[in-house]
Amino acid sequence: MTRYTGTNAWLDVDQHNVAVGTPNSPGAMVLPLSSLAQAQITPAEGGGLLTMMFAAATQPGGLVVPPQRIEVTFPGQAGPEFQALAGWLTQVAGMNQRTDRAAPAPGPTRTTAPVASTGPDPAPHVPQQTAAALIASLQTTAARFIAGDDTALATLDHDLAPATAPLPPGRLPAILWPVMSTAVEAACHDHQVTDDGEQRLNRLISMLGLTWDEARQQIPQAWHDLFLGHTPPASQSQAARPASQSAAAPIVSHPVVDALPVINPDGLPLVLKRGEVVHGVFQAELLKQEVEREFRGGSAGLSFPLGHGVRMRTGAMRGHSVVVGAKSVVADTGPLIVTSGRAVFVGHQHSLEFPYPKLLGLRQYKDGLSLSVSNRQATSVFQLGKHENPAEAVSLISRSAG
C-alpha cells in the first residue's frame, strides 16, 4: 500500500481500493477502484488538485456506498508523485468503462471536465505497491511453469494483457525482469539445469519479449547462476570440469551457455589480439609457497666453577636448519582476465599468460583456482577477491578452452 499525503487529505492506494482520510481523523473511507469513473489533476498556484469520481458501489455485507467525489489538494513539491497517481487512476477508470463495470458518476454542484480514457495514457505510471503486487503474482505463475505446469504460460499471457494489466510498453521490462529472475532461480534450484528446464526458460523469455543478451545486463546474477548450472559438453576433459558441477548427462542444446558474456571494461591492462574478446575480469592474488625453517642443535664441553656462583663453559655449539612447514604468501596482485583465447594475470611485478591450447590443468578451490600449462613447470595458484566467484571464473575458462 502506498500513501499519498495532501494538504487537506491523505490517500492509501493499493491494487484494489483507495482509502481516503483527513489529517485530524484516524478513520478512513474505503472506495473500490472498480467503481472509479474519472480522475484528473487541475494545476494550481503552489500545487494542484486531484479529483476522483466514484460510482455507487456495493461492498461485502450489502453496504451500498453512494457516488463519491474526492478532492485532494497537494503542494508543489508533491506534484510529480500525484501526477503519477493520476495517470494510473485515469487508466483504471478507462478500463472500468471498457468493461462496463461502472458508469461515470454524476458530479455534484461543481462540475469538472471529463477525463475518461478509451486507451492507455501516453505516459502512465504504476504506483509502487500495485507494481509489486503484479510482480509477485507473475513470479508465482512463472515458477509454476518452470516446475512443469504448462497452463501457467497461458495465465501469464492473460495477466499481461492490456485489459488486465494496464501497463505502458516502456514500463513492462521493469515488471518482467524480476519475473524472469525468479524463473531462472526455479530452474537452478538444485544447481543443475535440466534440458526441460532450459527449454521452458527459452519459451518463457520468448513469450515475455525479452532476450538473453538483455538478461546478461539486467539480471546478471541470475544469468550467471544459469550459466554455471549447465553441464559442460561431454568432450571436455575431467581436469577442466568445474568442481561445482556434477557429472549429469550433458544438455543437447546450449542457447544460453553458447552465448558467453562479452564485456568491455574500462582501463583494461591488456592488449587484445585480433578478434579476441573479454569474457570476465576477476581481482586476484598470485600465491607462492614459502618454506618455514627453524634452527635445531645443542652445545658440548666442560663447565668450571670460578666462585661466587660464576661458572665457565668450554666447548662448541652444534646444530642445523630444519624445514618445519610451508605457507602460502602473496607474491603479486592484479586482475585475472579471461578472454576467448587465453587467461592472463597482469600483476604489478609478474604477468602470466595461459593460452588455452597449452592448458593442462584447471582446478577450483573454495576461494580461488589454479592453472597449469605445458610450457611452464610450476602450477600457478590464484586467490580471488572476497566478492569474486571462483566457480564463474573456472566455468568461463573451461568453456572458452573447450
Image: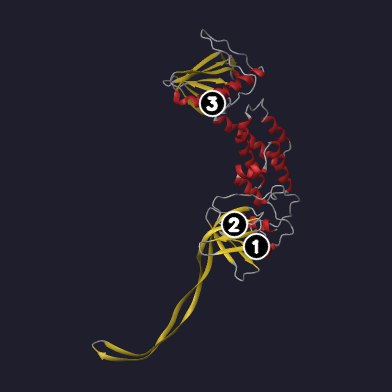
Q: Residues within 10 Å of mark 3 (few under 14, many from 20)?
A: some
Quote the CA–CA distance across marks 1 and 3.
55 Å
Mark nearer the N terminus (3 vs 2): 3
Query: Disc number at residue 149?
Result: none
Circle 1 — which element? strand
Judged from this view, the residue extending furthest toward the left is 308
Q: Quadrant of residue 152?
A: top right
- Element marked by disc 2: loop
Amino acid residing under circle 2 = Val
| Residue type at the position of mark 1 | Pro
- For the question of whether residue 119 can be seen, the reply is yes
| Nearest the eye: 2 or 51 | 51
Query: For the residues carrying marks 3 and 2, which lies nearer the camera in this image?
Result: 2
Check disc 2 and report the residue beneath it.
Answer: 271
Quadrant of the drawing holding the C terminus: bottom right
Mark 3: secondary structure: helix
Which circle marks residue 355 in the picture? 1
Are there few (<14), some (14-19), or many (20+) residues within 10 Å of tag 2? few
Mark 2 vs mark 1, foreground winner is: 2
Given contact means CB atoms under 8 Å apart, are the residues at marks 1 and 3 in contact? no
For the question of whether residue 190 can be seen, the reply is no
Q: Residue 61, relative to residue 389: is it above or below?
A: above
Q: Earlier in the sequence, mark 1 or mark 3?
A: 3
Mark 3 lies on residue: 84
